[in-house]
Image: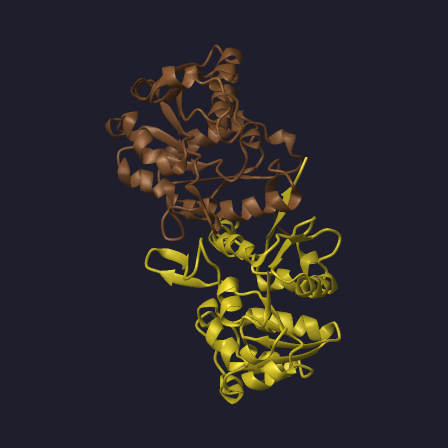
Chain colours: A yellow, B brown
Amino acid sequence: MRIAVLGTGMVGRALAGRLAELGHDVVVGTRDPAATMDRTEPDRAGTPPYREWQEQHPDVRLVPSPEAGVHAELLVNATAGTASVEALTGAGVGERAGLVVLDVANPLVFTDDGPALSIANTDSLAETLQRAFPRARVVKSLNTMTAQVMVDPARVPGQHVVFVAGDDAEAKATVSGLLGEMGWGDGRVVDLGGLAAARGTEGFLLLWLSIAQAYGTFDLNIAVHLP
Amino acid sequence: MRIAVLGTGMVGRALAGRLAELGHDVVVGTRDPAATMDRTEPDRAGTPPYREWQEQHPDVRLVPSPEAGVHAELLVNATAGTASVEALTGAGVGERAGLVVLDVANPLVFTDDGPALSIANTDSLAETLQRAFPRARVVKSLNTMTAQVMVDPARVPGQHVVFVAGDDAEAKATVSGLLGEMGWGDGRVVDLGGLAAARGTEGFLLLWLSIAQAYGTFDLNIAVHLP
């Protein structure tokens, strides 16, 4: 599949690298590829410069956002949630009727009073994107875990899960297929129904951050136990 | 321990019955005990009348809220989240310096656009109670699962978990002790730190509702998996 990943951070890199490894034709889209490649210092979050990752992944091309939008049969939103509408607009998502948008982002903001969501409770980032790009088919998934677990569920033992939510069944099936290729098989993909369920999976971010703090690692995931 | 449970619904009954069974001196507090005992029909949620439960639990006395407040060494808030401040005020919690309040409630509301929280994201019910009753010691726990699982974790297999959050270490230890008595031992009690972590456990409600819908049952809980 021709896949465009928007976002050059850890999440975008992890997904782009893994999807390319699986044989997909992957580009990473960003506003200014030259500026991204020119950086030689880690960013504020400590993420190493993109050029180092690029050297190890010559099969993944870094392209301007509009080119990424044209390339995409499926577009992955791995940008910061607070910048996602602008980023997808820049990639021309508004003009791509039927495009599957896999939204893995969270609308996380840091306040003086701790982490919070810029959209929450009665709305979600995923629904905001769907409203902004009504001709796209937005599917929310993978946003409940850290990047390394997204692309390699086997690194965490046991039958832990990934959620999908979206209003278009075919788009959800496409995303579930990709999840299966990345190792999310055997009943691990939990379909939560329509896109409004993203309110729950995005809202989980605050609990996830607390759990990660309690255990001292982001390298974890949740499982659902039933009698 | 002398325990008062505020709330006569399924959650209050489950906790009161279980804590009494464990040997604690338990009362259930409500605004108008006579009115509660007079009801002969199930409520809107289909909960059977309280008198039926009362007949099966003669060791648990139903008392007016102020009497429950006086009785309590530990008070369990099992009222509807939207009514909790008023209920705790009625029980005189404001006058009980040092009282441990185990808050198991969620500020759930049903809107035309689905379930939502009346307090969320940058605040929580638990913090609202702590601000309303600054001399109490509020501990948030058990609000991430259905009543039957709260009081009998063994009904769900595996190492699933319960979260605790609170600003007072001693109060959290008291609550963790009670959780242990109810079957939450062996590393299943996950301490998320201060009471602000209740934003995460209350926010989990929306995801929990979606998960329950996906599996067709509320009889479930989550586990945390680590490498």
| Quarter of the rendering containing residue A163 | bottom right
Q: Is residue B27 above or below residue A78?
A: above
Residue at left offset 40%, top offset 21%: B3
Q: From the viewer's perspective, is residue A117 above or below residue A71?
A: above
Q: Is residue B130 visible?
A: yes
Find the residue positioned furthest to the left. B95
Q: Is residue A2 left or right of residue A198?
A: right
The N terminus of chain A lies in quadrant: bottom right
Res. A70 image quadrant: bottom right
In the rendering, at what x and y percent does residue A210 appear? 47, 50
Residue A121, relative to residue B19: is it above or below?
A: below
Query: Which of A25 and A48 lies nearest the eye of the viewer?
Result: A25
Residue that appears at 41% across and 57% down: A116
Q: Position of residue B98 (x, y in %)?
A: 29, 29
Task: Say which quadrant the C terminus of chain A sits in.
Answer: top right
Residue B133 picture location, percent across and down? 27, 35
> In the image, is B192 to the left or to the right of B134?
right
**Quarter of image, res A138:** bottom right
Would you say residue B26 is visible in this rendering? no
Q: Along the line of sight, which residue is nearer the eye, B208 or B172?
A: B208
Residue farthest to the bottom, as pictured: A34
Task: Give how far across and how far down residue A166 sits, in percent.
Answer: 60, 60
From the viewer's side, name the closer residue of B195 and B81.
Answer: B81
